Image (spheres, rainbow, N blue to C red):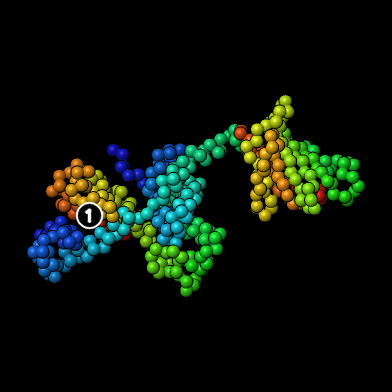
């Protein structure tokens, strides 16, 4: 039986052999990570979009090298930080020091940063943790994956709607949610979250 | 001693979904059961993290579309028929004997002819004012000498600044080009021709 969620290494291997669906899967796995890290580093929506596009191009061009990386997320985090730095320098909006590329007292004062007192290292770490969580969620089997994604999403329509959407009895949602959370917690513990 | 409190109750407690009485019961139990207290504390971290991760913002649909199309687009760009051809110089009026008037005097006009694969590239330089030149060029199909359809022309200086040419019929034009060394890129439907080193102005 094929693994429902191929590893990064498998996806990259498939991308290199010209499988466009593998590339789609890789992009959809990391798109929010790249974008939200740029956002955390003080980029506007439009700039985060640009950083995401540049990062995906670089990722594609470096698939061969990335294949041997232990963590794509860490590799991407460095890439995103460099791109954000380049973008800001072109605009001369944020002093270099604010992007943590120089030690300074300015850490945490990123222009437009959405989280108070965030250094680039902290931003990358927070994004990597969130990515780990999304990865663990993605590795859960159905219906746990869908159930947790729907129930804990900010726009969750509530138990009744989620039950209807997933074709599950209303009464089963509560107990199932508890089981699914337990599985998610175990996966995260196993991956060193 | 094992505790029989169902995990579901702890989840509901943590999520404030229990009735008052049941919630009080759990709260009392947590005071005396380290296992359950730890599980509730773990949930207290996991659930906000899960909400946070699911609320991560993502790129626009347009940007995602761009990323997804990358392999196909890059594949097209590297199509063998679109290879970049380096043009080789066949003729430079500045190096022809007696063509540029008295020795040491900069010519007022320069004619260059390049060849690249099945194309010929004509480039004229005319001094417009002071140190500035106008560049006029055209690409010809070598066999038959018909003008070739040029898509775009880019002139890039050693400072990396590029200027795109304007078109009049089959000729491309660049105005106000200063003395210096440039790279000229001519895009044709089935080939990109590059003149890596185009010297505008004096020949030395
Ligand atoms: Zn207990």
Q: Point out residue A18 in the picture as x, y percentages from the top left corner.
A: 45, 38
Q: Residue at x 34, y 57 (%)?
A: A130
Cβ of mark 1 under 8 Å from ligand 1: the answer is no
Most foreground residue, A105 or A49: A49
Most foreground residue, A31 or A113: A113
Tell me: residue A144, above or below residue A1.
Answer: below
Tell me: residue B165, above or below residue A92.
Answer: above
- Left or right, B7 with respect to A88, comes to left
Q: Point out residue A63 in the picture as x, y percentages from the top left corner.
A: 47, 47
Q: Secondary structure at mark 1?
A: helix
- Left or right, B191 with respect to B88, comes to left
Host chain of mark 1: A
Residue lying at the far bottom in this picture: please name it. A105
Q: Point out residue B92 in the picture as x, y percentages from the top left corner.
A: 80, 41
Q: Residue at x 31, y 42 (%)?
A: A3
Residue that numbered label 1 is attached to: A181
Q: Residue at x 17, y 66 (%)?
A: B37
Residue A147 appears anywhere in the view: yes
Residue A70 appears anywhere in the view: no
Residue B38 figure quarter: bottom left
Tell me: residue A181, above or below residue B92.
Answer: below
Q: Residue at x 60, y 35 (%)?
A: B82
Residue B18 figure quarter: bottom left
Q: Quadrant of the N terminus of chain A?
A: top left
Q: Point out residue A95 in the picture as x, y percentages from the top left corner.
A: 52, 67
Residue lying at the far right in this picture: please name it. B102
Residue B166 figure quarter: top right
């Amino acid at each position: 039986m094929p693994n429902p969620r191929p590893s990064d290494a498998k996806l990259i291997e498939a991308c290199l052999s010209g499988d466009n669906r593998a590339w789609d899967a890789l992009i959809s796995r990391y798109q929010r990570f790249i974008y939200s890290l740029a956002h955390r580093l003080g980029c506007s929506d439009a700039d985060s979009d640009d950083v995401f596009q540049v990062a995906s191009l670089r990722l594609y061009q470096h698939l061969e090298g990335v294949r041997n990386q232990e963590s794509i997320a860490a590799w991407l985090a460095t890439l995103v930080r460099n791109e954000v730095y380049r973008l800001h320098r072109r605009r001369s909006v944020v002093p270099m020091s604010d992007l943590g590329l120089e030690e300074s007292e300015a850490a945490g004062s990123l222009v437009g940063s959405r989280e108070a007192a965030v250094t680039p290292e902290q931003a990358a770490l927070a994004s990597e943790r969130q990515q780990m969580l999304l990865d663990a969620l993605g590795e859960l089997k159905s219906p746990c994956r869908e159930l947790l994604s729907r129930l804990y999403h900010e726009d969750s329509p509530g138990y009744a709607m989620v039950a209807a959407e997933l074709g599950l009895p209303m009464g089963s949602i509560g107990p199932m949610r508890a089981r699914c959370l337990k599985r998610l917690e175990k996966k995260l513990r196993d991956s060193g979250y | 001693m094992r505790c029989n409190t169902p995990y579901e109750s702890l989840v509901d407690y943590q999520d404030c979904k229990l009735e008052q009485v049941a919630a009080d019961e759990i709260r009392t139990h947590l005071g005396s059961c380290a296992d359950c207290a730890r599980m509730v504390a773990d949930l207290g971290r996991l659930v906000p993290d899960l909400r946070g991760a699911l609320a991560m913002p993502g790129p626009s649909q347009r940007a995602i579309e761009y990323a997804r199309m990358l392999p196909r687009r890059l594949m097209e760009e590297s199509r063998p028929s679109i290879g970049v051809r380096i043009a080789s110089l066949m003729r430079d009026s500045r190096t022809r004997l007696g063509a540029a008037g008295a020795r040491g005097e900069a010519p007022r006009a320069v004619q260059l002819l390049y060849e690249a694969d099945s194309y010929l590239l004509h480039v004229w330089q005319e001094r417009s004012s002071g140190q500035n030149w106008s560049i006029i060029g055209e690409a010809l199909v070598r066999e038959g000498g018909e003008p070739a359809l040029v898509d775009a022309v880019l002139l890039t200086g050693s400072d990396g600044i590029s200027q795109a040419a304007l078109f009049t019929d089959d000729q491309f034009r660049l105005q106000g080009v200063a003395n210096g060394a440039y790279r000229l890129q001519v895009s044709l439907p089935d080939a990109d021709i590059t003149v890596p080193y185009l010297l505008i102005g004096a020949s030395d």
